[in-house]
Structure formats: structure tokens, C-alpha cells
């Protein structure tokens, strides 16, 4: 399980009920991998996934492949950028404008609104940072193929208003370990067991608890990609949880929230979360839960650190199977959890799952419905998402200018100067500005020497810096 605490939307269902016309030049995932995505006891391995993403990008005018950086073991952390052909031709303009909007000190509101008129919403989707929660990586090829080939008018409208950054895995090294282990023991009594060693060389499951410490190469790469290269306005990360609770969790999350983050974050997360829930319900996916289990208080997760950078971050959690092996959960085996006492209908859980067989393909289907709901809603609310991204940064600068605090001071005289330098390095890698004084200065009765470093709060990512530097009371 990833963690235990921690309005009205018409979400577009991006695939019509009838089969869609598809480009014959783009191979389907089933043809490429030799099985349907999510088929019982079948997994697409990392070399094949990477090869498929490369093939689609080379053949499609809707897809461009980029590298976020190397993994710990030297693999490529890849992402497919998916949008309309028109947007693909001007990706550099879109990327540069996103960085401009992220820093409201570089342009006034009139200029920001002018950019927002033509700027697609940038939505990042990260799969399976926990490698044994493997369904999201198996979802990625099917989602990519659908968006690259569909001729459905709603899909085409959506791609005109959204740039999707699709990471097939946020932990390729762990994916290799998990697939190798599963295949080795398939057909034995150990089929579906978790590897008896870490599925990331150093941190295993805690790879997603390293987002502000950035000890791992993957998290340094994601931070650089998000805050300095692309800066998505929305980020969804797909996880899995225990097998006996709800079938699927989507936002809103459970309280408490970090009060430093802009209220627009939580309102937009609710909007997009309900869009996902609506798409899931329309597609007949029962057992969808909201407002329970997971909070967004702590800033160390891969999907909570971006909150302090004015990125609306979202989480889905699907009930797990045994890696790729199906399970059966009887109705009397279903359990509740924090904010979710039982499996009775409620406003946060209106359509309980009745129990029965549960498969990897079920999870893929739920993931596809959630992704379509998210992307469709991001397209429908493109203007609000882009403009509010700028407004949140502007508000953070204004709040910092008013004080409370005005700044954090890091004096040069430290008992452990290495720790102070490490702190500053992490702030800089998280796109926080740190300034050095060129002469002594006084604050109240304290005189600080030349060379003191100052983190002024009048900056766009004030919330991130403030949360890391002040005392937190949970």
C-alpha cells in the first residue's frame, strides 16, 4: 500500500462506445506484446515498453518522446509527449510559456492572459513508481495508442487543448526486477509473490518518499523535468493499494491539508477528481472511493512536493492483484479504512463493489477510465487551469512580500556547515531561490555577517520553501 495517512463536472469519456477508426501504420499493443494489456499472468517488460513508445513516437505526428534523465541503474526515464499535431509543432513555445507562467514576476496579468488564450493545459501522468504496483505501466501502451490513433472528435478536441506527458514508469529499474521475478516463479507456488529484495536498489518502496530529499537519481530527474524544463499544471500518479478495500480511490483526499498551499489547488483537485469518478461511473466501474484513506499533508511524496510549486497533484489507488495473477475477494472479506468504515453506499462511495474475481485487466480498465476523465476535464477547463497556475504563483509572491515570515536566514557560522550546504542544495534543486548577502545586516537586535544566505518568501514557490523550513504541526 502506498500510504495510510498520509462542481459540477461533465467529464469527457474520450472513447466512444463503438470501435474507433485507427491508423493502420501504428501497431496495437496487443500485436506488439503478443497479448492484451493486463491479460492474466502476462506482463510487458521494460525493453518492450520502451521500444513500443519509441516506435509510436517515430510514426505518429501526435507523439514526441523525451528523456527526463537516467535512472539509478542507467536506464532511460522516458516520457511520451502527446497532443495534437499542431501543438507538437510548437512544443518549444508551449514549454517556454509554461515556465513563464510559473514565475509571475516575469510578466503582468494582461500578458499572462494573452499567453493563456493559446496555451494548452500541461498534464503529466506518472505510472508505477512502486514497481510491484504494475498495472499502470501495463495501462500506458494502450492509453498511448488510443490517443495516437483515435479519430473520435472528442479525443481530437481534447488533444487540441491538452499536452499530456506520459511516463510509462517512474521506476524502470524496479519494473525490471518485478517482471523478472514474476516470470521466474510463474506456474509455481510462489507465483505472484513480491520480490524478497528491494525493487529499487537503495530505497525500495520509499522511492516515492524522496521527493524533497532527492537522494535518488529518479527523483532528481523528475524535479528538474517538472520545475525547470516543463512545469506541468496537473500531475497524476497511479498507484495500487491492498486487495480487500475499495476497488479504486480518486481525489478529493482526506484531511488534513498543508495550509501553505493555495486553496485553488484543493478546489481544482476536487474538480478533476470528480471528473475521474464520473468517467469511472459512466464506464460501469463500481467500488470507487473518495475523501478517505490518503491525505496530502506531508511534502515528501512524488505527488505532494509539486503542490508547493502550484501544480495540482492527484493520486489514484487501485485494489491490487498478485502482480499479474488474478484473485477472488468474497463480499464478506471486504474491509474499510481511514474515513471509510465499511462497504455501505455513501456520498463518497456510492456504488460498492459486490466482491468476486479481480484481475490485472480490471485495474487497467479502471486506469483508462480515470485517465480519460482527467484528460477530458483538463481540456474542458483548460483556460481556468492555465490562468490559475499563473495566479497561484502571483499570490505566493504577494504573500511573501507581506511577511509572516518575510524570509529565512541561514548564517554562515554553522555547527555543521555541510548540513547547511546540503539544505541549500536541496532548495535550489527544488527551484527555490536562495540569495547571498554581500555585507552585514541587522534584523531587530541581531547582526548577521556578510555571506549569510537568505530565502526570501516573495517567490513563486514560497509554499514549498515555507513548508520545508518552518515547524510543522500535524
Image (cartoon, helix red, strand yellow):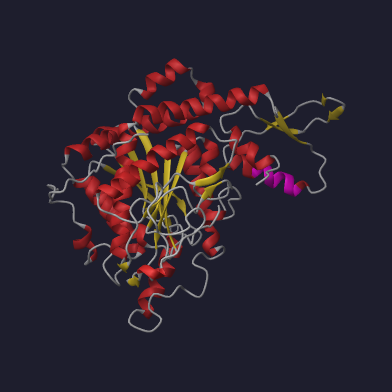
Q: Nearer the viewer, residue 435 or 169?
A: 169
**Residue pictured at 37% horizontal, 33% vertical:** 92
**Residue pictured at 34% horizontal, 72% vertical:** 327
**Residue pictured at 19% horizontal, 46% vertical:** 149
Q: Nearer the viewer, residue 255 or 312?
A: 255
63 inside magenta stretch: no
Q: Image quadrant of residue 343?
A: bottom left
Query: How many circles with numbers are drawn on the protein?
Result: 0
Residue 139, percent from left and from top: 31, 56
Residue that sits furthest to the right in the current view: 445
**Chain part drawn in magenta:** 418-425
Apparent side of residue 247 relative to residue 55 in the rendered image (left or right): right
Q: Image quadrant of residue 322?
A: bottom left
Residue 344, percent from left and from top: 39, 57
Residue 312, percent from left and from top: 46, 38
**Residue pictured at 38% horizontal, 63% vertical:** 134
In the image, residue 139 above or below residue 406: below
Q: Does any portion of residue 170 appear in the rendered image? A: yes
In the image, residue 297 above or below residue 432: below
Q: Does any portion of residue 233 appear in the rendered image? A: no
Apparent side of residue 447 relative to residue 17 in the rendered image (left or right): right
422 inside magenta stretch: yes
Apparent side of residue 425 relative to residue 190 in the rendered image (left or right): right
- Name the magenta segment's main secondary structure: helix
Residue that sits furthest to the top in the current view: 110
Amino acid at each position: 500500500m502506498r500510504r495510510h495517512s498520509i462542481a459540477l463536472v461533465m467529464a469527457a469519456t474520450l472513447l466512444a462506445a463503438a470501435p474507433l477508426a485507427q491508423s493502420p501504420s501504428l501497431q496495437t499493443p496487443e500485436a506488439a506484446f503478443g497479448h492484451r494489456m493486463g491479460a492474466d499472468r502476462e506482463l510487458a517488460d521494460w525493453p518492450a515498453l520502451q521500444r513500443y513508445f519509441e516506435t509510436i513516437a517515430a510514426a505518429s505526428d501526435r507523439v514526441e518522446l523525451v528523456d527526463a534523465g537516467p535512472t539509478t541503474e542507467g536506464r532511460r526515464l522516458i516520457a511520451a509527449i502527446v497532443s495534437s499535431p499542431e501543438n507538437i509543432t510548437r512544443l518549444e513555445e508551449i514549454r517556454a510559456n509554461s515556465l513563464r507562467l510559473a514565475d509571475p514576476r516575469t510578466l503582468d496579468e494582461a500578458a499572462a492572459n494573452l499567453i493563456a488564450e493559446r496555451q494548452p493545459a500541461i498534464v503529466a501522468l506518472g505510472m508505477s513508481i512502486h514497481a510491484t504496483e504494475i498495472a499502470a505501466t501495463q495501462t500506458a501502451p494502450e492509453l498511448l495508442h488510443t490517443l495516437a490513433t483515435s479519430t473520435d472528435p472528442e479525443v481530437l478536441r481534447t488533444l487540441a487543448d491538452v499536452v499530456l506527458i506520459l511516463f510509462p514508469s517512474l521506476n524502470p529499474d524496479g519494473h525490471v526486477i518485478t517482471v523478472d521475478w514474476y516470470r521466474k516463479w510463474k506456474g509455481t507456488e510462489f507465483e505472484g509473490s513480491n520480490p524478497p529484495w528491494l525493487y529499487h536498489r537503495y530505497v525500495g518502496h520509499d522511492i516515492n518518499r524522496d521527493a524533497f530529499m532527492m537522494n535518488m537519481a529518479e527523483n532528481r530527474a523528475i524535479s528538474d523535468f517538472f520545475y525547470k524544463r516543463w512545469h506541468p499544471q496537473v500531475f497524476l500518479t497511479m498507484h495500487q493499494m491492498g486487495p480487500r478495500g475499495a476497488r479504486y480511490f480518486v481525489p478529493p483526499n482526506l484531511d488534513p491539508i498543508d495550509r501553505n498551499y493555495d486553496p485553488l489547488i484543493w478546489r481544482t483537485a476536487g474538480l478533476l477528481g470528480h471528473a475521474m469518478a464520473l468517467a469511472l461511473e459512466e464506464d460501469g466501474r463500481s467500488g470507487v472511493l473518495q475523501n478517505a484513506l490518503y491525505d496530502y499533508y506531508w511534502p515528501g511524496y512524488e505527488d505532494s512536493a509539486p503542490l508547493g510549486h502550484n501544480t495540482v497533484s492527484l493520486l489514484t489507488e487501485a485494489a491490487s492483484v498478485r502482480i499479474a495473477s488474478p484473485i477472488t475477494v468474497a463480499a464478506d472479506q471486504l474491509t474499510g479504512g481511514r474515513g471509510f468504515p465499511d462497504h455501505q453506499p455513501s456520498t463518497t462511495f456510492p456504488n460498492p463493489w459486490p466482491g468476486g474475481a479481480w484481475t490485472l485487466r480490471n485495474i487497467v480498465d479502471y486506469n483508462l477510465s480515470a485517465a480519460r476523465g482527467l484528460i477530458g476535464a483538463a481540456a474542458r477547463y483548460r483556460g481556468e487551469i492555465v490562468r490559475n497556475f499563473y495566479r497561484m504563483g502571483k499570490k505566493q509572491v504577494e504573500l511573501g512580500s507581506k511577511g509572516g515570515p518575510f524570509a529565512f536566514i541561514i548564517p554562515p557560522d554553522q555547527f555543521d556547515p555541510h548540513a547547511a550546504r546540503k539544505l541549500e542544495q536541496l532548495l535550489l534543486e527544488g527551484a527555490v531561490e536562495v540569495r547571498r548577502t554581500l555585507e552585514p545586516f541587522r534584523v531587530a537586535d541581531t547582526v548577521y555577517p556578510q555571506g549569510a544566505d537568505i530565502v526570501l518568501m516573495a517567490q513563486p514557490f514560497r509554499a514549498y520553501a515555507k513548508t520545508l523550513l518552518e515547524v510543522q504541526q500535524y
